[in-house]
């Protein structure tokens, strides 16, 4: 990889991918791997990561009041949650020299609100810069999965069973656009974004992640 992107003593790894890609499992296993090597590791997620940001996450993901959440409103709520998350959690952990593992970050905004919802790329970039500043990932692991496979997995997810999720409720065309944008980001930024096929067993996926980390100075 080229020179690190994040200007902090720690190392910032984000996980991206469509619904059902298995990010949670891989992040937990990677946290355990780092802990075994003696590295302090913080696991967090987006939207979320702070009490306020988690409240905003509830609106973004689970609003079912009959009121339509406008795409730009959705973007601004996510940006507000991210700003709080970066300043209160991610940046301090990186300053302490910790490894930060984050389930989703600004690539998800480009994929879901940009390609999925059709929000202006210019507006998304303005919001990204305002929320993140220079706190950009050193490495992004994109768990790539066909949306049809993801649908089958999310139907059986215990953590969301019986709970309305605005993104999981979207149609195949939406999730296809999201996947295409994730892959386009990886093509534009191959040094930062590494694609790992997620249509395999969790153990095989983790082995692939471990293999690519062997070539990264953390």
Image (cartoon, grey):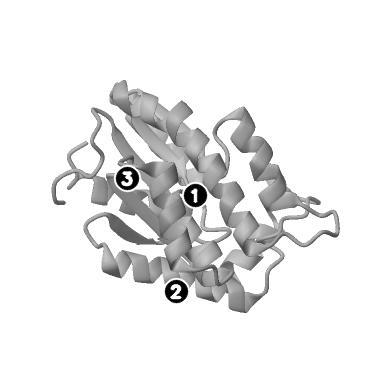
Which of disc 1 and disc 3 is earlier in sequence? 1
Mark nearer the viewer, 3 or 1: 3
How far apart are labels 1 and 2 at the CA level? 18 Å
Q: Earlier in the sequence, mark 1 or mark 2?
A: 1
- 161 relative to 118 in the view: left or right: right
Alpha carbon distance from label 3 to label 1: 16 Å
Question: Relative to residue 16, is residue 43 depicted above or below?
Answer: above
Residue 5 position within the rendered picture, expressed as x and y whole percent measured from the top left:
23, 45
Residue at figure coordinates x 45%, y 48% from the top left:
105
Q: Secondary structure at mark 3?
A: loop
* N-terminal label among 3 and 2: 3
Residue at numbered disc 2: 180
Asked if labels 1 and 3 touch by Cβ distance under 8 angstroms, the answer is no
Q: Quadrant of the C terminus?
A: top left
Q: Is residue 131 above or below residue 88?
A: below
- Tell me how many marks there are: 3
- Compared across the picture, whether 98 is left or right of 128 comes to left
Left or right: 165 with respect to 120?
A: right
Label 1, residues with CA under 10 Å away: few <14, some 14-19, many ≥20: many
Element type where label 2 sits in the image = helix
Q: Which mark is residue 137?
A: 3
Disc number lying in front (1 or 2):
2
Q: Which residue is mark 1?
A: 23
Instruction: Please state which of residues 16 and 128 is positioned toward the viewer in this rendering.
Output: 128
Q: Is residue 204 visible?
A: no
Inter-mark Cα distance, 3 to 2: 21 Å
């Amino acid at each position: 990889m080229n020179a690190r992107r994040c200007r902090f003593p720690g190392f910032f790894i984000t996980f991206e991918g469509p619904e059902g890609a298995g990010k949670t499992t891989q992040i937990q296993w990677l946290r355990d791997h780092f802990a075994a090597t003696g590295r302090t590791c913080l696991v967090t997620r987006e939207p979320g990561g702070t009490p306020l940001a988690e409240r905003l996450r509830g609106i973004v993901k689970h609003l079912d009041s009959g009121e339509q959440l406008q795409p730009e409103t959705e973007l601004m709520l996510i940006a507000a949650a991210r700003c709080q998350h970066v300043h209160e959690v991610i940046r301090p952990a990186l300053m302490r020299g910790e490894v930060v593992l984050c389930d989703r970050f600004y690539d998800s905004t480009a994929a879901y609100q940009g390609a999925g919802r059709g929000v202006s790329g210019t507006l998304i970039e303005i919001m990204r810069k305002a929320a993140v500043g220079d706190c950009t990932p050193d490495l992004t692991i994109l768990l790539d999965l066909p949306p049809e496979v993801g649908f089958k997995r999310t139907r059986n997810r215990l953590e969301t069973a019986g709970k309305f999720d605005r993104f999981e409720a979207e149609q195949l065309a939406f999730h296809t656009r999201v996947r295409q944008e994730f892959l386009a980001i990886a093509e534009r930024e191959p040094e930062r974004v590494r694609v790992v096929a997620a249509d395999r067993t969790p153990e095989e996926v983790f082995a692939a992640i471990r293999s690519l980390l062997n070539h990264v100075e953390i």
